[in-house]
């Protein structure tokens, strides 16, 4: 029995959902992309790396009753297996965040291998195909930990006037991480969020972003949809709350695009990750 379980374990693909700008749809994208990937049959671990804990509460986790959280993972005081919580979505687990995480930045400053804490916790065989990390709105040590642990980044961009503002900082941070900590890191894709088809500005911003990022931008655009913003107050992903709403359909389409890109990047297996693991072990 133990052997069978061991065989199921594999190195998951790790995607961070990151943009240091606040309120652009990182958490909404993390929760609904993770749910849609589970609906497609993948086993997914959603990691809440934001002290605000919106991904955890949006999945119905009562944060006050948590014994351990992503904080304990970062400081090596708990394992993923001991911290993980099941959600109401089959195939989707969550590593919840607690308020302690707000102190982690300062505590990490003097810590050894402070950028590698998540990588060391996650680059090990697990019972998941994907780990999706919901990053906080900053380029802090927490986000740096997420990028060092990740294979790829999904960047949500809100369709508003200042969408591209500050993006050069994110791109520079990614380049720095590639050079110093994690050479395999790349941008998986840019996802346009809160698109309002009645507003010309949304279309203009979308065109600008496509000019700037080309094919890196996913074809799927996430519309502004009130069901997406209501769902978290019921502790449910929008895909479960109202699977027929335009927002839910868009996230299912995004998940299919993500999987199609994944197949191009790594083929149908996880051999790339296996070799990356060996590289890390040697290092
Ligand atoms: P933060 O930087 O604070 O972590 P965030 O980038 O994670 O924010 P979200 O929390 O996902 O952003 O979204 C910000 C707000 O916009 C939330 O109230 C969310 O419900 C709402 N929202 C996100 N996407 C949409 C959408 N497509 N349509 C309508 N509302 C949305
Ligand atoms: Mg968020």
Image (cartoon, grey):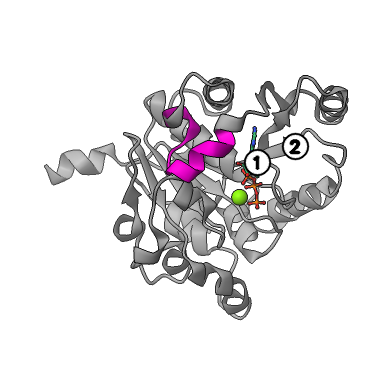
> Can you tell me whether the CB of the residue at mark 2 lies under 8 Å from the nearest atom of ligand 1?
yes
11 or 238: nearer the viewer: 238
Q: In this view, does 197 lie above or below 180?
A: above
Percent of width and height locating residue 163: 82, 39
Left or right of 7 on screen, residue 105: right
Left or right of 89 on screen, residue 147: right
Q: Residue at x 41, y 23 (%)?
A: 40
Find out whether the residues at labels 2 and 1 contact each other: C-beta distance under 8 Å: yes
Q: What stretch is highlighted in magenta?
A: 228-240
Instruction: State the SS at label 1.
Output: loop
Task: Name the quarter where the N terminus is drawn.
Answer: top left
> Can you tell me whether the CB of the residue at mark 1 lies under 8 Å from the nearest atom of ligand 1?
yes
Residue most toward the bottom? Answer: 110
Mark 1 = which residue? 25
Mark 2 = which residue? 158
138 or 23: nearer the viewer: 23
Instruction: State the SS at label 2.
Output: strand
Q: Which residue is drawn at 85% across and 29% down?
A: 205
Q: Residue at x 68, y 63 (%)?
A: 140
Q: Is residue 81 above or below residue 232?
A: below
201 or 92: nearer the viewer: 201
Residue 267 in sight: yes
**How far apart, in angstroms, are the residues tagged by discs 2 and 1?**
7 Å
- Of the residues under marks 2 and 1, which one precedes in the sequence? 1
Quadrant location of ligand 1? top right
Percent of width and height locating residue 102: 57, 70
Q: Say few, some or many: other residues with alpha carbon within 10 Å of mark 1 (under 14 / 14 to 19 / 20 or more).
A: many
Percent of width and height locating residue 218: 68, 24
Dominant secondary structure (helix, strand or loop) of the stretch shown in magenta: helix
């Amino acid at each position: 029995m133990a052997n069978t379980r061991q065989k199921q374990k594999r190195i998951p693909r790790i995607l961070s959902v990151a943009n240091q700008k606040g309120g652009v749809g990182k958490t909404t994208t993390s929760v609904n992309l993770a749910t849609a990937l589970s609906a497609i049959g993948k086993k997914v671990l959603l990691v809440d790396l934001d002290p605000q804990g919106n991904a955890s509460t949006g999945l119905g986790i009562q944060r006050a009753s948590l014994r351990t959280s992503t904080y304990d993972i970062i400081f090596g005081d708990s394992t993923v297996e001991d911290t993980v919580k099941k959600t109401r979505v089959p195939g989707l687990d969550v590593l919840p965040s607690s308020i302690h995480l707000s102190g982690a930045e300062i505590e990490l400053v003097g810590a050894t291998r402070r950028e590698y804490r998540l990588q060391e916790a996650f680059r090990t065989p697990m019972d998941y195909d994907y780990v999706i990390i919901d990053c906080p709105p900053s380029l802090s040590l927490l986000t740096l930990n997420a990028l060092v642990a990740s294979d790829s980044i999904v960047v949500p961009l809100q369709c508003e006037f200042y969408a591209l503002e500050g993006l050069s900082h994110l791109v520079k941070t990614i380049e720095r991480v590639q050079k110093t900590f994690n050479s395999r890191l790349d941008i998986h894709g840019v996802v346009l969020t809160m698109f309002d088809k009645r507003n010309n500005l949304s279309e203009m911003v979308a065109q600008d972003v496509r000019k700037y990022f080309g094919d890196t931008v996913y074809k799927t655009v996430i519309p502004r949809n009130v069901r997406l913003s209501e769902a978290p107050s019921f502790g449910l992903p929008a895909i479960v709350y109202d699977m027929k709403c335009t927002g839910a359909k868009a996230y299912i389409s995004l998940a299919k695009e993500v999987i199609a890109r994944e197949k191009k990047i790594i083929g149908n297996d996880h051999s790339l990750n296996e070799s990356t693991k060996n590289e890390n072990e040697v290092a």
